[in-house]
Image: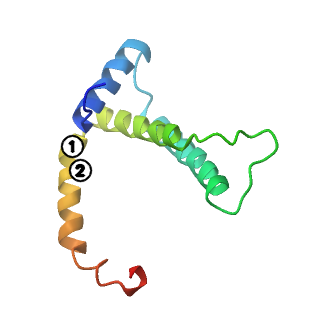
Amino acid sequence: MEHLTLKKAQQLVDEWTKKYGVRYFSELTNMAILTEEVGELARIIARKYGEQSFKKGEEEKDHVGDEMCDILWVLLCMANQMGIDLSAEFAKNIKKKTERDKTRHIANPKLS
């Protein structure tokens, strides 16, 4: 696949949804799905990097990237249905964080 931008990812999700998904789920349903997907990622992270162990029958395969993509997919769906250009919003968000935090983390002794 070509170099993927947020704009292109939003377009691919929109095309896929119209071709295979019939339509977008409602914003509320997508919020619930997003919460579910974040929980699935949290479960894997807790077992792989935290103190929890995998339950009997649970796969120990590395699904972290796949779960992150599930989360991204739902976020892209929500952005599309709400008319949000994530590329533009991400650029504004980076600028906001830079202006707000340009010295905050560097000056934090806990991070040294």
Q: Residue at x 82, y 43 (%)?
A: 56
Picture layout, residue 105 above or below residue 74: below
Residue 3, given in percent of the width and then of the height, sits at 25, 32
Picture layout, residue 11 above or below residue 6: above
Q: Residue at x 59, y 42 (%)?
A: 62
Residue 47, given in percent of the width and then of the height, sits at 67, 54
Q: Quadrant of residue 99?
A: bottom left
Mark 2 residue element: helix
* Image side of residue 77 versus residue 67, left or right: left
**Mark 2 surroundings within 10 Å by alpha-carbon count, few (fewer than 14), some (14 through 19), many (20 or more):** few
* Image side of residue 17 versus residue 7, left or right: right
Mark 1 residue element: helix
The residue carrying mark 1 is 87
The residue carrying mark 2 is 90
Name which residue type carries label 2: Phe
Outermost residue, top direction? 19
Picture layout, residue 101 above or below residue 24: below
Residue 46 visible in the shown view = yes
Q: CA distance from mark 2 to mark 1?
A: 5 Å
- Of 22 and 110, which appears nearest the observer? 110
**Mark 1 surroundings within 10 Å by alpha-carbon count, few (fewer than 14), some (14 through 19), many (20 or more):** some
